[in-house]
Amino acid sequence: MTAKSAPGGDAPVVLDVSLLGRDYKVTCREAERAQLMDAVGFLDRRMREIRDAGKIAGSERIAVMAALNITHDLLRAKSDARGSKAEAAGPAIDDTGVRRRIAAMHAAIDQALAGRVAEPKRP
């Protein structure tokens, strides 16, 4: 990898990267360089895994399959994260049942304050 950058803080940088043995020029901000290089390494490994499995020929097809696999993994992770948040929030609340119990508690409190203590009715 080589880089050419303009003088300055967060100026665009042109990187020479290699994916599956083919060289590409990619532009990014200096602050994004490390993340971009991590992405290049990750994509190159995935493309090599697909190529080495021997089921797909041609670098373009390998790149498309790698993109599909990575996208699938990302979407599954997002879905799992949403599911985890929903599970952490607890089970769904039965709104009607809760409202009935609150109404019964209000009635019991009103009766207690009126001097007529009664057991709250259970739904």
Image (cartoon, rainbow, N blue to C red):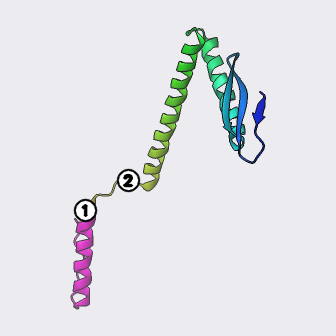
For label 2, count other residues whose C-alpha is less than 10 Å away and answer few (under 14), some (14-19) or many (20+): few
Residue 91: numbered disc? 2
Looking at numbered disc 2 in the image, what kind of residue is underneath it?
Pro
Looking at numbered disc 1 in the image, what kind of residue is underneath it?
Gly
Element under disc 1? helix
**Is residue 55 on the magenta stretch?**
no
Q: Magenta region: which residues?
A: 98-123
Element under disc 2? loop
Location of residue 71 in the rendering, given as x and y in whole percent from the top left corner: 51, 30
| Disc on the earlier residue, 1 or 2 | 2
For label 1, count other residues whose C-alpha is less than 10 Å away and answer few (under 14), some (14-19) or many (20+): few
Residue 97: numbered disc? 1
Query: Which residue is located at x 72 percent, y 41 percent?
Result: 30
Left or right of 84, for residue 15: right
Q: Is residue 123 above or below residue 81?
A: below
Query: Which residue is located at x 43 percent, y 55 percent?
Result: 89
Q: Is residue 93 above or below residue 110?
A: above
Q: Which quadrant of the figure contains the N terminus?
A: top right
Query: Which residue is located at x 22 percent, y 79 percent?
Result: 107
The residues bearing labels 1 and 2 have C-alpha atoms spaced at a distance of: 14 Å
Left or right of 45, for residue 122: left
Q: Is residue 16 above or below residue 95?
A: above
Location of residue 19 in the rendering, given as x and y in whole percent from the top left corner: 67, 21
Residue 81: numbered disc? none
